[in-house]
Image (cartoon, rainbow, N blue to C red):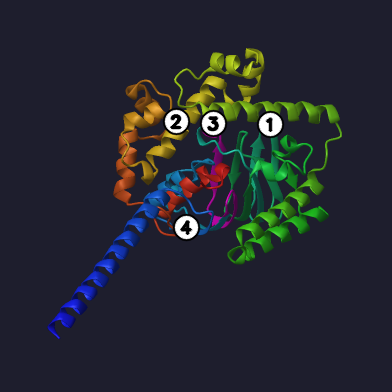
């Protein structure tokens, strides 16, 4: 009898040990998964944010969250103190649809900001209330309630809006490229409310936002294809075929150069001579292509800073020393990097990392104060599908 009891105890202990080992394996697996996912954005999610009047900290966080797209500001100190925003957005990989209300604000998208962020998507904005006055590389227009305006985020623009309510769709260039003969000609165009296509496009965007929470990733991308077809019906092919060809060739060159630069940001030798030698292009063509971006050397510097900013603010790289990140981004001197980083982002790299750690930003935040950090990382990831 005692032998049988001892045997049962041994069996029970082995079973307990087996369960403990299984639990430890599961915990280790979960920890590894969390480590892999840390700092990444999911391919599909909802984000809710708000800024309450009288909260200067929230206004600064909102400004920082918007920084990958625009340098945002209010008219003066009084306007900043009373500034208010409510925003709900959905992301489907590299597509975002955003509904929001905001106090009056100004938005600037400059060549250095474009280079730094690397975001080159197309933005459609329909104003339910208010509107804006904007300048898109010399194309100035007044956008009224009910109108839709188009902005190419790879090119400079400035906007001034009174209190407004808007619905915005941000989509990748690749989604529109097959449908439009003259994608470059879309920047700064306005689809007025009186145009019959306006009601179709606005209705489509409103339906997309209303159903966004129920759409799968595949459904969201299919809806974007429908949007692209409606935009093509409005924009249409240019009457000047040679102009379209010239712009298409210029755009293709820019894409090729940008991909090469992104792949070689780590190389300290990356510069005009390096690019010309490796790609077999003339300096004149290279300089001409990057002239609207402030020059090729400036573009490379801003992209290096943008890459460094992404790494420094990514929790997955919190263990990496600032000097290592600087070297990974092609900077040969930590002091030169720190000065350039502070000039671009307002804080030295070490202080920016410490500020984020104090704020305890989560990896994925759907609302609350830390959501502003999520918003910034999400916008920076739009061009790569949020990865």
Q: Residue at x 65, y 36 (%)?
A: 135
Relative depth, front residue between 76 and 112:
112
Q: Nearer the viewer, mark 3 or mark 4?
A: 3
The disc, 2 or 1, on the residue closer to the chain's N-terminal end is: 1
Instruction: Report the residue marked by disc 1.
Output: 138
Return the x and y of residue 205 as percentages of the image width and height: 68, 58
In three-dimensional space, the C-alpha distance between marks 3 and 1, rounded to whole angstroms, equals: 20 Å
Q: Nearer the viewer, mark 2 or mark 4?
A: 2
Relative depth, front residue between 7 and 221:
7
The disc, 2 or 4, on the residue closer to the chain's N-terminal end is: 4
Q: Nearer the viewer, mark 2 or mark 1?
A: 2
- As drawn, the label of residue 305 is 2
In three-dimensional space, the C-alpha distance between marks 4 and 1, rounded to whole angstroms, equals: 33 Å
Relative depth, front residue between 212 and 145:
212
Instruction: Report the residue marked by disc 3.
Output: 115
Secondary-structure class at tag 2: helix
Q: Is residue 305 left or right of 128 when viewed as pictured?
A: left
Q: Residues within 10 Å of mark 4 (few under 14, many from 20)?
A: some
In three-dimensional space, the C-alpha distance between marks 2 and 1, rounded to whole angstroms, equals: 28 Å
Task: Look at the image and give the residue range highlighted in magenta.
Answer: 92-114
Q: Nearer the viewer, mark 4 or mark 1?
A: 4
Q: Residues within 10 Å of mark 2 (few under 14, many from 20)?
A: many
């Amino acid at each position: 009898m005692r032998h049988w009891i001892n045997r049962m105890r041994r069996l029970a202990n082995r079973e307990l040990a087996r369960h403990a080992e299984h639990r430890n394996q599961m915990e280790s697996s979960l920890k590894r998964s969390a480590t892999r996912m840390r700092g990444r954005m999911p391919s599909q999610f909802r984000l809710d944010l708000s800024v309450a009047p009288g909260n200067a900290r929230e206004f600064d966080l909102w400004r920082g969250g918007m920084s990958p797209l625009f340098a945002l500001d209010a008219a003066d100190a009084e306007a900043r103190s009373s500034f208010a925003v409510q925003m709900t957005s959905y992301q489907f990989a590299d597509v975002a649809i955003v509904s929001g209300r905001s106090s009056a604000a100004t938005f600037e998208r400059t060549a250095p900001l474009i280079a730094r962020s690397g975001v080159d998507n197309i933005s459609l904005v329909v104003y339910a209330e208010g509107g804006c006055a904007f300048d898109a590389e010399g194309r100035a227009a007044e956008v009224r309630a009910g109108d839709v305006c188009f902005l190419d985020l790879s090119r400079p623009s400035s906007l001034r809006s009174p209190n407004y309510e808007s619905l915005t769709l941000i989509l990748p260039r690749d989604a529109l490229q097959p449908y439009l003969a003259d994608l470059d000609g879309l920047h700064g165009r306005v689809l007025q409310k009186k145009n019959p296509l306006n009601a179709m496009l606005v209705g489509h965007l409103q339906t997309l936002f209303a159903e966004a929470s129920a759409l799968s990733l595949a459904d969201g991308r299919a809806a974007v294809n429908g949007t692209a077809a409606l935009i093509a019906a409005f924009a249409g092919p240019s009457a000047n075929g040679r102009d379209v060809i010239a712009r298409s060739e210029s755009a293709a060159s820019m894409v090729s150069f940008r991909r090469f630069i992104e792949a070689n940001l780590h190389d300290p030798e990356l510069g005009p001579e390096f690019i010309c030698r490796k790609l077999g292009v003339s300096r004149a063509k290279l300089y001409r292509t990057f002239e609207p971006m402030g020059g090729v050397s400036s573009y490379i510097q801003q992209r290096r800073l943008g890459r460094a900013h992404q790494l420094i603010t990514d929790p997955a790289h919190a263990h990496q020393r600032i000097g290592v990140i600087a070297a990974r981004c092609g900077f040969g001197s930590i002091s030169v990097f720190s000065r350039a980083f502070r000039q671009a982002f307002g804080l030295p790299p070490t202080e920016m990392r410490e500020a984020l750690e104090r704020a305890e930003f989560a990896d994925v935040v759907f609302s609350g104060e830390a959501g502003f950090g999520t918003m910034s990382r999400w916008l920076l990831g739009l061009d790569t599908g949020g990865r």
